[in-house]
Image: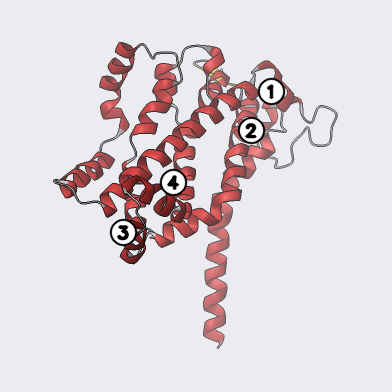
């Protein structure tokens, strides 16, 4: 009994330490969003912001929102991320349904090639992609940020294929007997059943596009089209950085992501569990 108590105490102590380590950078970011630049790197460090409960407590937030137009950048990021995520849901659910429930020549080879694309990093394909976007005249528009994510989703296709393969064949047979063709079968039977993995895919696709920096830097040159990760680079230069504003902007950039994750985390956990990807 005593050994079990000691074991539980040790496990909880280790987990608490890891939790503090994981949460500390986020807390440090919030604390320093209420600090002056001079107080951030003070030695010894202080974990109480020097602007806390003072009249200028929200000065950093006012500066970031008014002088750096963060609301506009937030709207740009929301537009790009929502568009790309909804596109991935549409194309990946269609492809996942086809690979899971339809028979056609070369299906396994095609699926293997699709999975192989997951091993190719974006940096390898970015130059031909840039040349293609330039030929299409899409530079300095949202299209290069949305269309590649909209059309290509090997992970999402794999996720939904795994889910659709586990749906009983009897359900599909019943729908076919009632006169449903492949598209009706997909739209009225399989798509509604896939709410949980679709929600999982939406969160993952949204986060990936929300945090993307390489494509926006390459394709966007107008200030009015900048996304939030690009906007954060305004606080850094070759001569230094405005750390208090950078941390304030970083916190504002995390808030929408955190809210979406908070509302949809249940679906994400269920989706990963049901598709056998929990690891």
Of badges 4 and 2, the one in the foreground is 4
Q: Earlier in the sequence, mark 2 or mark 3?
A: 3
Image spot of residue 237 (x, y percent):
52, 17
Residue 201: assigned label: 4
- Distance, label 2 to label 1, CA atoms, is 9 Å
Residue 65: assigned label: 1
Image spot of residue 233 (x, y percent):
52, 22
Label 1: which secondary element: helix
Image spot of residue 37 (x, y percent):
67, 26
Residue pictured at 65% horizontal, 30% vertical: 248
Q: On the image, numbered disc 2 is attached to which residue?
A: 252
Q: Are marks 2 and 1 in contact (CB under 8 Å)?
A: yes
- Distance, label 2 to label 3, CA atoms, is 40 Å
Up the image or down, 38 lies above or below 32; here it is above
Label 3: which secondary element: helix
Q: Are marks 4 and 2 in contact (CB under 8 Å)?
A: no
Q: On the image, numbered disc 3 is attached to which residue?
A: 165
Up the image or down, 205 lies above or below 66; here it is below
Q: Residues within 10 Å of mark 4 (few under 14, many from 20)?
A: many
């Amino acid at each position: 009994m005593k050994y079990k108590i000691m074991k539980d105490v040790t496990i909880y102590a280790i987990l608490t330490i890891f939790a503090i380590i994981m949460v500390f950078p986020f807390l440090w970011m919030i604390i320093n969003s209420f600090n002056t630049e001079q107080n951030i790197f003070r030695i010894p460090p202080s974990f109480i912001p020097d602007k806390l409960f003072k009249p200028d407590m929200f000065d950093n937030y006012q500066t970031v929102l008014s002088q750096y137009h963060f609301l506009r950048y937030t709207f740009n990021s929301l537009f790009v991320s929502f568009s790309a995520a909804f596109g991935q849901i549409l194309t990946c659910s269609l492809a996942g349904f086809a690979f899971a429930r339809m028979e056609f020549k070369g299906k396994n080879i095609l699926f293997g090639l699709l999975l192989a694309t997951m091993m190719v990093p974006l940096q390898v394909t970015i130059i031909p992609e840039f040349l293609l976007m330039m030929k299409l005249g899409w530079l300095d528009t949202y299209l290069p940020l949305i269309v590649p994510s909209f059309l290509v989703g090997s992970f999402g296709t794999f996720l939904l294929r795994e889910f659709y393969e586990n749906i009983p064949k009897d359900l599909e047979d019943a729908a076919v007997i009632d006169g449903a063709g492949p598209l009706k079968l997909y739209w009225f039977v399989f798509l509604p059943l896939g709410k949980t993995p679709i929600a999982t895919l939406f969160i993952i696709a949204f986060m990936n596009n929300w945090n993307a920096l390489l494509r926006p830097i390459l394709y966007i040159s107008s200030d009015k089209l900048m996304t939030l990760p690009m906007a954060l680079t305004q606080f850094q230069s070759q001569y230094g950085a405005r750390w208090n504003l950078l941390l304030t902007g970083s916190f504002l950039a995390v808030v929408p992501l955190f809210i979406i994750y908070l509302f949809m985390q249940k679906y994400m956990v269920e989706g990963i569990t049901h598709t056998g990807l929990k690891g």
